[in-house]
Image (spheres, helix red, strand yellow):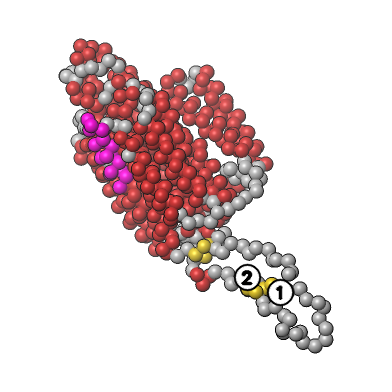
Amino acid sequence: MSSAPSAPAATPIVLTRRRVNVIFSALLAGMLMAALDQTIVSTAMPTIVGDLGGVSHMAWMTTAYLLATTLVMPVYGKFGDLYGRRTLFLVAIGLFTAASLGAALAPDFGWLVVWRGVQGLGGGGLMILSQAIIADIVPARERARYMGPIGALFGLSAVAGPLVGGFLTDSAALGWRWCFWVNVPIGLAAFAVGWAALTLPRKRSTTPLDLAGILTLSVATSSLVLATDLGGSEGWGSWQVLALLAVLAGSIAAFVLVERRAVEPIVPLSLFGNPTFVVATALGMAVGLGMFAAVAFTPTYLQMSSGLSAANSGLLMLPMTAGIIVTIQSSAAVIMRTGRYKRFTVAGVALILAAMVWMTTLAGDTALWTVGAMFFLLGAGLGLIMQNVVLAAQNAVPADQIGTATSTNNYFREVGAVLGVAVFGTLFTTRLADRLGEALTGNPEQAVAAGITSPDTLVPTAVQAAGEPLRTAIVEAYADALAPVFWYLVPILALALLLALALREVPLSEVAGMVARGEAVAREEDLPVVPPVTLVADQPAATTGAPDRDDARAPVQR
């Protein structure tokens, strides 16, 4: 027989509407788990830190998760581009589920922070890979159609999470640990759905990994977050903060040098030569800083200063959810019809800025309907901007860089979130510790009678049990500590508004990422026509005349 021909390339996947919807359902399952965890923990946080004696270090509950999420985002993005996204998505679900189990069993506050960090390692993958896979299977022009379900998903989690978290926390039979236990069955179900429904191409790459880039970027990120966290407690001029800032500067310089020489850099420096990508990424970073800082500590403030239970403080997130759903649904329809997204980005930042200025007026006696109106305005702004920033970044780069662009854009947004939570949390907790100390030392007998021995062990039920004037003093301490700190976010959001105005609007692509890379086709009739391959028997050299048909072997089609 003659030598066999080389194996043909893999047949492209057909992105039928049914296949796209099945893949999208698997992504929603993973995103629901991560979104629910964040909102469940928010209303349970005051009780958790009080029970485990970590009020002074409350910010680390959020910072640990966000830091871990930020560290792994570039890794998931680049590895997805090189090796495919299916296996990575399942790994992210597995990490998140295992960490939830660890957090539910945490014996003290330190271990809880560790497991929250491991949750972040999985949560970062769920966030990045979901956005990148959607860009793989849906053209940018049609992607707005999927913003509605995603917005509804996060809206559902924003409602259900605080309610479930508040119910579990207030329940004498269950308790706050069930805020983590509940993730275990959800995670197992999400893994099963992803395993069955996530049909994506697998890739093989012989390109050496950019380990030096991953290491230097991780060192830079960690030193930045630690410096901001220690700055408020140890002083910005302390030797610890100065040493961390020196490490930050050195690791950034090393990272740039490494990326310039890497074959496949974890964050290609060429991205920063793209003006649209740069502005969209800077805008996401500025908004992330303000958004996460505002949302992270508001439920704590409401529980302590307004005397609300964990469940009722969760109900106050309903207006924010309504704002997100209303604006994300309405803007998605217009974007899909017109292809224009910049106007919504500008309007979204303006609404968030207005909400932040309004929230500086919060006080212990602020009416609940006023707080609800503030949250609705904040949610309306978030619904207009949170998907459009990623859409602009993805649409501005080639199809083979979708994962890397998505992860880099999200990385800088999370850096903003980490900085916001760290700086905002440090300012809040430092002011709070001072004022609570004054409140307790000024009313020692009432503090002992209410079982309040230290600000670190203060829980909402103890505040409500305290008599006057101690209760009023504690409420005023929370109000005085939190509301003025919102002013620090106003200049940052004003800068974000300028960035939104400077964003250049690139026409939205009408080709999905996998189609552009040749990994998929939109219709079956677009599949390449492969000519039949025949194998024939070796024959003697032909003589004159026609070949003898009886001796010829029939062609075999492969």
Name the one closer to the observer, 312 or 497. Answer: 312
Q: Looking at the image, which residue sits at the far bottom?
A: 545
Q: Secondary structure at mark 1?
A: loop
Residue 348: image tag: none
Disc 1 + disc 2, Cβ < 8 Å: no
Q: Quadrant of the N terminus?
A: bottom right
| Magenta segment includes 169 | yes
Residue at 60% from the left image edge and 45% from the top image edge:
268
Residue at 50% from the left image edge and 41% from the top image edge:
73
Residue 558: image tag: 2
Q: Quadrant of the C terminus?
A: bottom right
Name the one closer to the observer, 157 or 102. Answer: 102
* Left or right: residue 253 compared with residue 443: right
Residue at 38% from the left image edge and 32% from the top image edge:
103
Q: Which residue is mark 1?
A: 536
Residue type marked 1: Val
Could you say which quadrant of the image residue 175 lies in? Answer: top left
Q: Earlier in the sequence, mark 1 or mark 2?
A: 1
